[in-house]
Protein backbone atom coordinates (compact mmCIF):
# COMPACT_ATOMS: atom_id res chain seq x y z
CA UNK A 1 0.00 0.00 0.00
CA UNK A 2 2.84 2.37 0.92
CA UNK A 3 4.51 1.60 -2.42
CA UNK A 4 1.32 2.48 -4.28
CA UNK A 5 1.10 5.79 -2.39
CA UNK A 6 4.71 6.59 -3.24
CA UNK A 7 4.10 5.84 -6.91
CA UNK A 8 1.03 8.10 -6.94
CA UNK A 9 2.87 10.92 -5.16
CA UNK A 10 5.83 10.60 -7.52
CA UNK A 11 3.50 10.67 -10.54
CA UNK A 12 1.73 13.80 -9.31
CA UNK A 13 5.06 15.50 -8.61
CA UNK A 14 6.39 14.53 -12.03
CA UNK A 15 3.31 15.74 -13.87
CA UNK A 16 3.20 19.05 -11.99
CA UNK A 17 6.87 19.59 -12.59
CA UNK A 18 6.45 18.79 -16.26
CA UNK A 19 3.58 21.28 -16.54
CA UNK A 20 5.69 24.00 -14.94
CA UNK A 21 8.55 23.22 -17.29
CA UNK A 22 6.19 23.41 -20.26
CA UNK A 23 4.90 26.75 -19.04
CA UNK A 24 8.42 28.10 -18.66
CA UNK A 25 9.32 26.88 -22.15
CA UNK A 26 6.19 28.48 -23.59
CA UNK A 27 7.00 31.76 -21.85
CA UNK A 28 10.51 31.69 -23.29
CA UNK A 29 9.12 31.02 -26.76
CA UNK A 30 6.57 33.81 -26.42
CA UNK A 31 9.29 36.25 -25.36
CA UNK A 32 11.84 35.28 -27.97
CA UNK A 33 9.73 34.37 -31.02
CA UNK A 34 6.73 36.06 -32.66
CA UNK A 35 3.32 34.59 -31.93
CA UNK A 36 2.60 34.28 -35.65
CA UNK A 37 5.30 31.60 -35.80
CA UNK A 38 4.65 29.84 -32.49
CA UNK A 39 0.96 30.37 -31.77
CA UNK A 40 2.01 31.23 -28.21
CA UNK A 41 1.12 34.56 -26.58
CA UNK A 42 2.61 35.93 -23.38
CA UNK A 43 0.35 36.01 -20.35
CA UNK A 44 1.83 38.87 -18.32
CA UNK A 45 -0.65 38.32 -15.51
CA UNK A 46 0.28 34.64 -15.17
CA UNK A 47 3.97 35.56 -15.20
CA UNK A 48 3.24 38.03 -12.39
CA UNK A 49 1.78 35.33 -10.17
CA UNK A 50 -1.97 35.61 -10.77
CA UNK A 51 -3.84 32.36 -11.36
CA UNK A 52 -5.46 31.53 -14.69
CA UNK A 53 -8.84 31.30 -12.97
CA UNK A 54 -8.42 34.83 -11.58
CA UNK A 55 -7.29 36.10 -14.99
CA UNK A 56 -10.26 34.56 -16.81
CA UNK A 57 -12.60 36.02 -14.21
CA UNK A 58 -11.15 39.52 -14.59
CA UNK A 59 -11.44 39.50 -18.39
CA UNK A 60 -14.98 38.12 -18.17
CA UNK A 61 -15.98 40.85 -15.71
CA UNK A 62 -14.62 43.60 -17.95
CA UNK A 63 -16.58 42.16 -20.86
CA UNK A 64 -19.73 41.94 -18.73
CA UNK A 65 -19.35 45.54 -17.56
CA UNK A 66 -19.00 46.87 -21.10
CA UNK A 67 -21.48 44.68 -22.96
CA UNK A 68 -24.03 43.47 -20.39
CA UNK A 69 -23.91 45.44 -17.13
CA UNK A 70 -25.83 48.53 -16.00
CA UNK A 71 -23.10 50.85 -17.30
CA UNK A 72 -22.75 49.01 -20.62
CA UNK A 73 -21.86 50.74 -23.87
CA UNK A 74 -23.43 48.02 -26.06
CA UNK A 75 -27.13 48.32 -26.93
CA UNK A 76 -29.18 45.82 -28.90
CA UNK A 77 -31.63 46.97 -31.56
CA UNK A 78 -34.40 44.55 -32.50
CA UNK A 79 -33.54 40.90 -32.89
CA UNK A 80 -30.47 41.18 -35.13
CA UNK A 81 -28.58 44.47 -34.62
CA UNK A 82 -26.69 46.40 -31.94
CA UNK A 83 -24.40 49.40 -31.57
CA UNK A 84 -21.61 50.59 -29.27
CA UNK A 85 -22.04 54.14 -27.97
CA UNK A 86 -19.59 56.81 -26.86
CA UNK A 87 -22.02 57.86 -24.18
CA UNK A 88 -20.19 61.01 -23.09
CA UNK A 89 -20.35 62.35 -26.66
CA UNK A 90 -23.89 61.09 -27.35
CA UNK A 91 -22.95 59.21 -30.49
CA UNK A 92 -22.00 55.88 -31.99
CA UNK A 93 -18.77 56.03 -33.95
CA UNK A 94 -16.89 53.66 -36.19
CA UNK A 95 -14.03 53.63 -33.69
CA UNK A 96 -16.12 52.00 -30.97
CA UNK A 97 -18.25 49.88 -33.28
CA UNK A 98 -15.20 48.30 -34.89
CA UNK A 99 -13.52 47.94 -31.48
CA UNK A 100 -16.61 46.13 -30.27
CA UNK A 101 -16.34 43.74 -33.20
CA UNK A 102 -12.68 43.09 -32.45
CA UNK A 103 -13.46 42.32 -28.80
CA UNK A 104 -16.26 40.01 -29.94
CA UNK A 105 -14.15 38.02 -32.41
CA UNK A 106 -11.30 37.66 -29.91
CA UNK A 107 -13.63 36.41 -27.16
CA UNK A 108 -15.78 34.27 -29.51
CA UNK A 109 -18.98 36.31 -29.16
CA UNK A 110 -20.43 35.66 -32.60
CA UNK A 111 -23.90 37.08 -32.03
CA UNK A 112 -22.47 40.34 -30.69
CA UNK A 113 -20.10 40.59 -33.65
CA UNK A 114 -22.86 39.95 -36.18
CA UNK A 115 -25.25 42.42 -34.56
CA UNK A 116 -22.70 45.25 -34.58
CA UNK A 117 -21.72 44.53 -38.17
CA UNK A 118 -25.32 44.53 -39.41
CA UNK A 119 -26.01 47.86 -37.67
CA UNK A 120 -22.79 49.40 -39.02
CA UNK A 121 -23.53 48.25 -42.54
CA UNK A 122 -27.15 49.39 -42.50
CA UNK A 123 -26.76 52.79 -40.92
CA UNK A 124 -23.19 53.92 -41.60
CA UNK A 125 -21.76 52.24 -44.69
CA UNK A 126 -22.15 54.19 -47.94
CA UNK A 127 -23.64 51.90 -50.58
CA UNK A 128 -23.05 54.16 -53.59
CA UNK A 129 -21.35 57.35 -54.71
CA UNK A 130 -17.74 58.51 -54.22
CA UNK A 131 -17.72 57.20 -50.63
CA UNK A 132 -19.03 53.72 -51.54
CA UNK A 133 -17.78 51.08 -49.12
CA UNK A 134 -16.62 53.63 -46.55
CA UNK A 135 -18.48 54.50 -43.33
CA UNK A 136 -19.84 57.72 -41.88
CA UNK A 137 -17.76 57.97 -38.72
CA UNK A 138 -20.35 59.32 -36.28
CA UNK A 139 -24.12 59.14 -35.79
CA UNK A 140 -26.59 60.00 -33.06
CA UNK A 141 -28.10 56.58 -32.24
CA UNK A 142 -31.29 58.12 -30.88
CA UNK A 143 -32.18 60.48 -33.75
CA UNK A 144 -30.21 58.43 -36.34
CA UNK A 145 -28.85 61.70 -37.73
CA UNK A 146 -25.28 61.39 -38.96
CA UNK A 147 -22.86 63.90 -37.47
CA UNK A 148 -20.67 63.49 -40.54
CA UNK A 149 -20.80 61.60 -43.82
CA UNK A 150 -17.01 61.33 -43.88
CA UNK A 151 -14.80 58.51 -42.64
CA UNK A 152 -12.23 58.22 -39.87
CA UNK A 153 -9.65 55.84 -41.30
CA UNK A 154 -9.07 53.80 -38.13
CA UNK A 155 -12.67 52.59 -38.16
CA UNK A 156 -12.28 50.98 -41.56
CA UNK A 157 -8.90 49.56 -40.46
CA UNK A 158 -10.55 47.70 -37.57
CA UNK A 159 -13.63 46.69 -39.56
CA UNK A 160 -11.49 45.05 -42.26
CA UNK A 161 -9.21 43.23 -39.82
CA UNK A 162 -12.03 41.97 -37.61
CA UNK A 163 -13.98 40.75 -40.65
CA UNK A 164 -10.94 38.85 -41.95
CA UNK A 165 -10.54 37.24 -38.52
CA UNK A 166 -14.25 36.35 -38.47
CA UNK A 167 -13.92 34.66 -41.87
CA UNK A 168 -11.01 32.64 -40.51
CA UNK A 169 -12.80 31.70 -37.29
CA UNK A 170 -16.43 31.16 -38.29
CA UNK A 171 -16.28 30.67 -42.04
CA UNK A 172 -18.51 32.49 -44.49
CA UNK A 173 -21.62 30.30 -44.51
CA UNK A 174 -23.33 31.23 -41.25
CA UNK A 175 -25.39 34.17 -42.50
CA UNK A 176 -22.66 36.72 -43.22
CA UNK A 177 -19.90 36.32 -45.77
CA UNK A 178 -17.25 38.03 -43.65
CA UNK A 179 -14.51 37.72 -46.24
CA UNK A 180 -16.70 39.23 -48.93
CA UNK A 181 -17.58 42.15 -46.65
CA UNK A 182 -13.89 42.79 -45.86
CA UNK A 183 -12.99 42.58 -49.53
CA UNK A 184 -15.76 44.99 -50.47
CA UNK A 185 -14.27 47.67 -48.22
CA UNK A 186 -10.79 47.00 -49.57
CA UNK A 187 -11.89 46.81 -53.20
CA UNK A 188 -13.82 50.07 -52.86
CA UNK A 189 -10.79 51.62 -51.17
CA UNK A 190 -8.60 50.77 -54.14
CA UNK A 191 -11.06 52.42 -56.55
CA UNK A 192 -10.84 55.78 -54.79
CA UNK A 193 -8.93 58.18 -57.05
CA UNK A 194 -9.88 61.59 -55.71
CA UNK A 195 -13.29 61.70 -57.38
CA UNK A 196 -15.54 63.77 -55.11
CA UNK A 197 -12.39 64.57 -53.10
CA UNK A 198 -12.41 61.02 -51.68
CA UNK A 199 -9.21 58.98 -51.57
CA UNK A 200 -7.72 55.67 -50.47
CA UNK A 201 -7.62 55.11 -46.71
CA UNK A 202 -3.85 54.85 -47.17
CA UNK A 203 -1.89 57.65 -48.78
CA UNK A 204 -0.48 55.53 -51.57
CA UNK A 205 2.53 57.78 -52.22
CA UNK A 206 3.62 57.72 -48.57
CA UNK A 207 2.23 54.25 -47.75
CA UNK A 208 0.75 55.61 -44.52
CA UNK A 209 -2.79 55.63 -43.21
CA UNK A 210 -4.56 58.97 -43.54
CA UNK A 211 -6.30 60.90 -40.80
CA UNK A 212 -9.34 61.11 -43.05
CA UNK A 213 -9.39 59.91 -46.69
CA UNK A 214 -10.88 63.17 -47.88
CA UNK A 215 -9.52 66.52 -49.04
CA UNK A 216 -6.33 67.77 -47.41
CA UNK A 217 -6.82 65.37 -44.49
CA UNK A 218 -5.49 62.73 -46.89
CA UNK A 219 -2.07 64.34 -46.48
CA UNK A 220 -1.40 63.80 -42.78
CA UNK A 221 -1.94 61.09 -40.22
CA UNK A 222 -2.68 60.01 -36.65
CA UNK A 223 0.10 57.96 -35.00
CA UNK A 224 -2.48 55.85 -33.16
CA UNK A 225 -3.88 54.70 -36.52
CA UNK A 226 -0.54 53.05 -37.34
CA UNK A 227 -1.06 49.34 -36.75
CA UNK A 228 1.68 47.48 -38.64
CA UNK A 229 0.33 44.18 -37.30
CA UNK A 230 -2.99 44.74 -39.10
CA UNK A 231 -1.24 45.31 -42.42
CA UNK A 232 0.59 42.02 -41.90
CA UNK A 233 -2.79 40.36 -41.36
CA UNK A 234 -4.13 41.92 -44.58
CA UNK A 235 -1.09 40.62 -46.46
CA UNK A 236 -1.83 37.13 -45.15
CA UNK A 237 -5.60 36.92 -45.52
CA UNK A 238 -7.06 39.66 -47.74
CA UNK A 239 -5.77 37.94 -50.91
CA UNK A 240 -6.58 40.97 -53.06
CA UNK A 241 -3.30 41.20 -54.96
CA UNK A 242 -1.88 44.02 -52.82
CA UNK A 243 0.11 41.84 -50.42
CA UNK A 244 3.47 43.53 -51.02
CA UNK A 245 1.94 46.98 -50.65
CA UNK A 246 0.52 46.01 -47.24
CA UNK A 247 3.88 44.62 -46.13
CA UNK A 248 5.50 47.87 -47.27
CA UNK A 249 2.90 49.81 -45.25
CA UNK A 250 3.74 47.75 -42.16
CA UNK A 251 7.44 48.54 -42.52
CA UNK A 252 6.70 52.20 -43.24
CA UNK A 253 4.55 52.45 -40.10
CA UNK A 254 7.38 51.00 -38.02
CA UNK A 255 9.80 53.61 -39.34
CA UNK A 256 7.17 56.33 -38.85
CA UNK A 257 6.78 55.33 -35.19
CA UNK A 258 10.54 55.67 -34.72
CA UNK A 259 10.32 59.23 -36.00
CA UNK A 260 7.16 60.43 -34.27
CA UNK A 261 8.04 59.24 -30.74
CA UNK A 262 10.26 61.49 -28.62
CA UNK A 263 13.82 60.16 -28.19
CA UNK A 264 13.73 60.54 -24.39
CA UNK A 265 10.10 60.28 -23.24
CA UNK A 266 8.71 57.98 -25.95
CA UNK A 267 5.70 60.31 -26.21
CA UNK A 268 4.08 61.03 -29.58
CA UNK A 269 1.66 63.71 -30.81
CA UNK A 270 -2.01 62.93 -31.40
CA UNK A 271 -1.62 64.05 -35.02
CA UNK A 272 1.46 64.04 -37.23
CA UNK A 273 2.87 64.76 -40.65
CA UNK A 274 3.97 61.72 -42.63
CA UNK A 275 7.51 62.67 -41.58
CA UNK A 276 6.52 62.06 -37.96
CA UNK A 277 6.63 65.77 -37.07
CA UNK A 278 3.75 67.04 -34.90
CA UNK A 279 0.68 68.32 -36.75
CA UNK A 280 -1.47 70.95 -35.04
CA UNK A 281 -5.05 71.63 -36.14
CA UNK A 282 -7.42 74.57 -35.71
CA UNK A 283 -9.12 72.66 -32.89
CA UNK A 284 -6.04 71.32 -31.09
CA UNK A 285 -2.35 72.06 -30.60
CA UNK A 286 -0.12 69.03 -31.14
CA UNK A 287 0.58 67.07 -27.97
CA UNK A 288 0.29 63.62 -26.41
CA UNK A 289 -3.44 63.31 -25.70
CA UNK A 290 -6.28 60.78 -25.83
CA UNK A 291 -5.58 59.24 -29.25
CA UNK A 292 -1.94 58.84 -28.27
CA UNK A 293 -2.76 56.49 -25.41
CA UNK A 294 -3.29 53.76 -28.03
CA UNK A 295 0.23 53.89 -29.45
CA UNK A 296 2.02 51.73 -26.83
CA UNK A 297 -0.72 49.11 -27.20
CA UNK A 298 -0.37 49.10 -30.98
CA UNK A 299 3.42 48.78 -30.81
CA UNK A 300 3.10 45.97 -28.26
CA UNK A 301 0.72 44.14 -30.61
CA UNK A 302 3.22 44.33 -33.46
CA UNK A 303 6.03 43.17 -31.17
CA UNK A 304 4.03 40.20 -29.91
CA UNK A 305 2.45 39.11 -33.18
CA UNK A 306 5.23 39.61 -35.73
CA UNK A 307 8.41 40.70 -33.93
CA UNK A 308 10.04 42.44 -36.90
CA UNK A 309 11.30 45.51 -35.01
CA UNK A 310 12.06 44.11 -31.58
CA UNK A 311 15.22 46.03 -30.64
CA UNK A 312 13.67 49.45 -31.21
CA UNK A 313 10.34 48.43 -29.66
CA UNK A 314 12.06 47.17 -26.50
CA UNK A 315 13.95 50.45 -26.19
CA UNK A 316 10.74 52.42 -26.81
CA UNK A 317 8.96 50.55 -24.00
CA UNK A 318 11.78 51.31 -21.56
CA UNK A 319 11.71 55.01 -22.43
CA UNK A 320 7.93 55.29 -22.30
CA UNK A 321 7.45 53.45 -19.01
CA UNK A 322 10.46 55.17 -17.44
CA UNK A 323 8.95 58.55 -18.28
CA UNK A 324 5.57 57.69 -16.77
CA UNK A 325 7.28 56.27 -13.68
CA UNK A 326 9.18 59.56 -13.27
CA UNK A 327 5.82 61.32 -13.00
CA UNK A 328 4.67 58.95 -10.23
CA UNK A 329 3.10 55.55 -10.70
CA UNK A 330 -0.06 56.72 -8.98
CA UNK A 331 -0.09 60.26 -10.28
CA UNK A 332 1.07 60.45 -13.92
CA UNK A 333 -1.36 62.58 -15.90
CA UNK A 334 -2.88 61.90 -19.29
CA UNK A 335 -1.75 64.78 -21.53
CA UNK A 336 1.81 65.98 -22.15
CA UNK A 337 3.95 67.90 -24.55
CA UNK A 338 6.25 65.45 -26.29
CA UNK A 339 9.17 66.50 -24.07
CA UNK A 340 7.12 65.53 -21.02
CA UNK A 341 6.13 69.01 -19.85
CA UNK A 342 2.52 69.94 -19.13
CA UNK A 343 0.69 71.40 -22.15
CA UNK A 344 -0.88 74.85 -21.98
CA UNK A 345 -3.95 73.66 -23.88
CA UNK A 346 -5.94 70.85 -22.23
CA UNK A 347 -8.23 68.87 -24.51
CA UNK A 348 -11.56 68.19 -22.87
CA UNK A 349 -13.24 64.78 -22.73
CA UNK A 350 -16.92 65.23 -23.44
CA UNK A 351 -17.83 68.27 -21.35
CA UNK A 352 -14.97 67.81 -18.86
CA UNK A 353 -11.68 69.69 -19.28
CA UNK A 354 -9.25 68.30 -16.74
CA UNK A 355 -5.98 66.42 -16.48
CA UNK A 356 -6.34 63.19 -14.55
CA UNK A 357 -4.66 59.84 -13.82
CA UNK A 358 -6.68 58.06 -16.48
CA UNK A 359 -7.60 54.40 -16.63
CA UNK A 360 -7.14 54.29 -20.41
CA UNK A 361 -3.49 55.31 -20.20
CA UNK A 362 -2.86 53.17 -17.11
CA UNK A 363 -4.13 50.23 -19.14
CA UNK A 364 -2.21 50.75 -22.37
CA UNK A 365 0.99 51.61 -20.50
CA UNK A 366 0.86 48.10 -19.03
CA UNK A 367 0.85 46.52 -22.49
CA UNK A 368 4.33 47.98 -23.02
CA UNK A 369 5.52 45.47 -20.43
CA UNK A 370 5.21 42.90 -23.21
CA UNK A 371 8.31 44.59 -24.67
CA UNK A 372 10.11 45.86 -21.58
CA UNK A 373 12.30 43.15 -20.06
CA UNK A 374 13.26 45.21 -17.00
CA UNK A 375 11.96 43.70 -13.75
CA UNK A 376 10.34 46.92 -12.55
CA UNK A 377 8.14 46.88 -15.64
CA UNK A 378 5.93 44.47 -13.71
CA UNK A 379 4.71 47.46 -11.67
CA UNK A 380 2.62 48.49 -14.67
CA UNK A 381 1.12 45.00 -14.97
CA UNK A 382 0.15 45.04 -11.29
CA UNK A 383 -1.29 48.52 -11.70
CA UNK A 384 -3.49 47.31 -14.57
CA UNK A 385 -4.54 44.30 -12.51
CA UNK A 386 -5.62 46.51 -9.61
CA UNK A 387 -7.32 49.16 -11.77
CA UNK A 388 -11.10 49.39 -11.77
CA UNK A 389 -13.59 50.56 -14.36
CA UNK A 390 -15.55 52.89 -12.10
CA UNK A 391 -16.23 56.63 -11.65
CA UNK A 392 -13.31 58.83 -10.61
CA UNK A 393 -13.44 60.69 -7.31
CA UNK A 394 -14.95 63.75 -9.01
CA UNK A 395 -17.72 61.63 -10.55
CA UNK A 396 -16.34 61.58 -14.12
CA UNK A 397 -16.87 58.18 -15.75
CA UNK A 398 -16.03 57.02 -19.26
CA UNK A 399 -16.90 53.35 -19.78
CA UNK A 400 -16.52 53.89 -23.53
CA UNK A 401 -12.94 55.04 -24.18
CA UNK A 402 -11.39 54.20 -20.82
CA UNK A 403 -13.41 50.99 -20.85
CA UNK A 404 -12.49 49.77 -24.32
CA UNK A 405 -8.77 50.50 -23.83
CA UNK A 406 -8.99 48.71 -20.48
CA UNK A 407 -10.66 45.74 -22.21
CA UNK A 408 -8.09 45.59 -25.00
CA UNK A 409 -5.22 45.89 -22.52
CA UNK A 410 -6.55 43.08 -20.35
CA UNK A 411 -6.79 40.94 -23.48
CA UNK A 412 -3.19 41.75 -24.45
CA UNK A 413 -1.83 41.20 -20.95
CA UNK A 414 -3.62 37.85 -20.60
CA UNK A 415 -2.58 36.53 -24.01
CA UNK A 416 -6.18 36.61 -25.27
CA UNK A 417 -5.64 39.14 -28.09
CA UNK A 418 -4.43 36.95 -30.94
CA UNK A 419 -3.96 36.52 -34.67
CA UNK A 420 -6.93 34.41 -35.72
CA UNK A 421 -5.76 31.99 -38.38
CA UNK A 422 -8.03 29.93 -40.64
CA UNK A 423 -9.42 26.83 -38.98
CA UNK A 424 -7.81 23.75 -40.48
CA UNK A 425 -10.34 21.53 -42.23
CA UNK A 426 -9.65 17.81 -41.82
Image: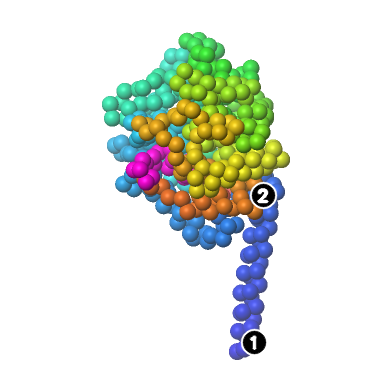
Q: What is the number of the mark on residue 347?
A: none
Residue 225 in view in this figure:
no
Relative vertical location of residue 90 with respect to residue 366 in this rendering, above or below: above
Residue closest to the eye, 358 or 10: 358
Residue closest to the eye, 406 or 61: 406
Position in image of residue 111 (x %, y %): 40, 42
Q: Is residue 410 covered in magenta? A: yes
Color encoding of the figure = rainbow
Describe residue 29's horizontal placement relative to residue 130 as left or right.
right
Q: Is residue 338 covered in magenta? A: no
- Secondary structure under tag 1 reads helix
Describe residue 112's horizontal placement relative to residue 238 as left or right.
left
Location of residue 16 by image quarter = bottom right
Q: Residue at x 65, y 43 (%)?
A: 318
Describe residue 148's horizontal placement relative to residue 28 as left or right.
left
Relative vertical location of residue 53 with respect to residue 308 in this rendering, above or below: below
Question: Residue under circle 1?
Answer: 3
Residue 311 in view in this figure:
yes
- Secondary structure under tag 2 reads loop
Relative vertical location of residue 394 with respect to residue 137 in this rendering, above or below: below
Q: Residue at x 61, y 19 (%)?
A: 204
Position in image of residue 186 (x %, y %): 54, 25
**What segment is highlighted magenta in the picture?**
392-414
- Quarter the N terminus occupies: bottom right
Location of residue 187 by image quarter = top right
Q: What is the number of the mark on residue 373?
A: 2
Amino acid sequence: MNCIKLIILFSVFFLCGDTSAQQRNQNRMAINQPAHDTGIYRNLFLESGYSQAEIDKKVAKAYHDLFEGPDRIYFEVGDSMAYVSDIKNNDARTEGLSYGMMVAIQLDKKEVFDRIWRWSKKYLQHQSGPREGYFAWSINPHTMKKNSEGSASDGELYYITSLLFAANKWGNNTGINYYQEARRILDCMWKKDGTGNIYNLINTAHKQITFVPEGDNYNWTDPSYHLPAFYEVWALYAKDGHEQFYLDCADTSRVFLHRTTHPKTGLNPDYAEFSGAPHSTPWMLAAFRYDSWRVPMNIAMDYSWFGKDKAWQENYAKRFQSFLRSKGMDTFEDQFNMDGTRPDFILQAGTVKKLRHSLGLIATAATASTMNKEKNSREFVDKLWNAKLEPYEDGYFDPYYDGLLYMFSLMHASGKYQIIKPIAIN
